[in-house]
Image: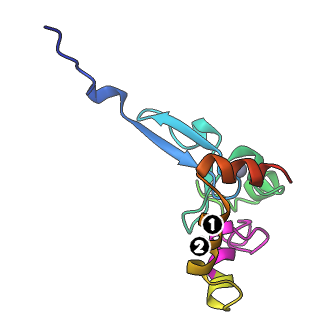
Amino acid sequence: MKIKRNFVTNSSTTAYVCIVCGETVGAYDSQSMEDCGFMQCENGHELCGSCLPDNIDVMKNEGDYEGKILEKYCTICTLKTITDKDLLSFLQKEGVIERQNEENIIREQFKNYEDIQKCLKRN
Ligand SMILES: [Zn+2]
Ligand SMILES: [Zn+2]
């Protein structure tokens, strides 16, 4: 009888998820965030290569970079980009949407997850 051995300790991975676009990259323990093209701001926002601020080179030249993107350059910290999560929280807070209601509408209109994904991709 064969015994499955799926738990190989040296293959454990970390995943970096871009807070702006959701791009996810799995990294082995030996790979740093920068090896994966990701950078983090001082408040912990992880950004992928395509979502980094434009002035990243200026920042490095001015010595404004110490392994982390400074808050004043981070697209999230400066509100240049508002994440879907923050936007949703704000709308709920303002009473523009009521999560429970919207969820019920979604459940009434769609059969399953695949169904709603089809609709969301259409626009
Ligand atoms: Zn990104
Ligand atoms: Zn930030």
Residue at point 59% right, 73% down?
104
Residue 23 in the image, given as x and y percentages of width and height: 65, 45
The span shown in magenta is 70-89
Task: Report the quarter where the C terminus lies.
Answer: bottom right
Q: Which of the 4 quarters of the picture holds residue 77?
A: bottom right
Eyeballing the image, is 6 above or below 53? Answer: above
Residue highlighted by disc 1:
108
Eyeballing the image, is 68 above or below 72? Answer: above
SS type, badge 1: helix
Circle 2 crowding by C-alpha within 10 Å: few under 14, some 14–19, many from 20: few
Residue 83 part of the magenta-drawn span:
yes
**The disc labelled 1 sits on which kind of residue?**
Glu
Residue placed furthest toward the bottom = 94
Q: Which of the 4 quarters of the picture holds residue 1?
A: top left
Whether ligand 1 has any atom under 8 Å from the Cβ at mark 1 is answered as no
Q: Of the numbered discs in the image, which one, if any, rests on residue 58?
A: none
13 or 3, which lies in front? 3
**The disc labelled 2 sits on which kind of residue?**
Asn
Residue 40 in the image, given as x and y percentages of width and height: 59, 56
Circle 1 crowding by C-alpha within 10 Å: few under 14, some 14–19, many from 20: few
Residue 122 in the image, given as x and y percentages of width and height: 83, 50
Q: Nearer the viewer, mark 1 or mark 2?
A: 1
Residue 35 in the image, given as x and y percentages of width and height: 58, 36
Q: In this view, does 55 lie to the left or right of 42?
A: right
Residue at point 58% right, 53% down?
67
Whether ligand 1 has any atom under 8 Å from the Cβ at mark 2 is answered as no
Residue highlighted by disc 2:
104
- For the residues bearing labels 1 and 2, Cβ distance under 8 angstroms: yes
Q: Is residue 104 left or right of residue 91?
A: left
63 or 27, which lies in front? 27
Residue at point 68% right, 63% down?
109
Q: Main secondary structure of the magenta part?
A: loop
